Image (spheres, rainbow, N blue to C red):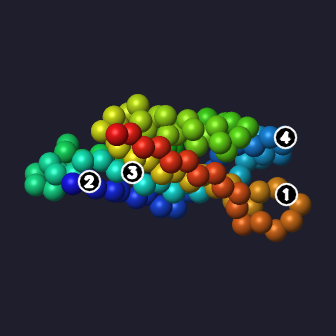
Amino acid sequence: MKQTIELSGMKFYAYHGVSPQETQVGNYFMVDLSYTFPAKTALESDDLRDTVNYAEVYETVKAEMECPARLLEHVAGRIVRALENAFPQLTRIKLKVSKLNPPLGGEVYSASVTLESARI
């Protein structure tokens, strides 16, 4: 049996982007994440040590969001790699990183990149 945990609407203020305004002033970003892993032990034990603690997952995402990058693709890739390294029991990760109100000269709610990673 597998279990999926979702962290939706994680909001961060960060300095990702190509333009000087984005790297100096910053912007808000939204991160949505779901991850899957074997669940049998946690379902029976009711012990935090037998799951993938979403507080620890959040801290991993937060640490990567704090490191400026030019491209959303790069940020998303770093987050996925960090999660895979920190939590080897993960079998699937789906991550969406969105820049809110991107500076495009028009009204756009967000620009997003979605990555999916699966391990057998």
N-terminal of the pair, mark 4 or mark 1, is 4
Q: Which residue is mark 2?
A: 2
- Three-letter amino acid code of the residue under disc 4: Pro
Q: Position of residue 59 (x, y in %)?
A: 44, 43
Say if 117 sits above or below 8 in the image.
above
Q: Nearer the viewer, mark 4 or mark 3?
A: 3
Residue 104 has which mark? 1
Asked whether residue 34 is in view, the answer is: yes
Choose the circle earlier in sequence order: 2 or 4. 2
Residue 104 in the figure: left or right of residue 64: right
Q: Earlier in the sequence, mark 2 or mark 1?
A: 2
Q: Which residue is farthest front?
A: 120
Is label 2 in contact with label 4 (beta carbons under 8 Å)? no
**Circles 2 and 1 in contact, beta carbons < 8 Å:** no
Type of amino acid at the residue the image marks with label 2: Lys
Tally of numbered discs: 4
Q: Earlier in the sequence, mark 4 or mark 3?
A: 4
Disc 4 from disc 1: Cα separation: 14 Å
Mark 2 to mark 3: distance in Å?
Answer: 10 Å
Q: Nearer the viewer, mark 2 or mark 1?
A: 2
Looking at this view, is 75 or 92 the one in front? 92
Which residue is labeled 3 in the image? Answer: 35
Mark 2 and mark 1: span between their CA atoms?
A: 41 Å
| Of the image marks 2 and 3, the number of the one nearer the N terminus | 2
Name of the residue lying farthest toward the top: 85
For the residues labelled 4 and 3, the Cα–Cα distance comes to 34 Å
Image point (39%, 51%), residue name:
35
Q: Which residue is mark 4?
A: 20
Q: Kindly identify the residue that appears in the image at 68 percent across and 36 percent down.
A: 69
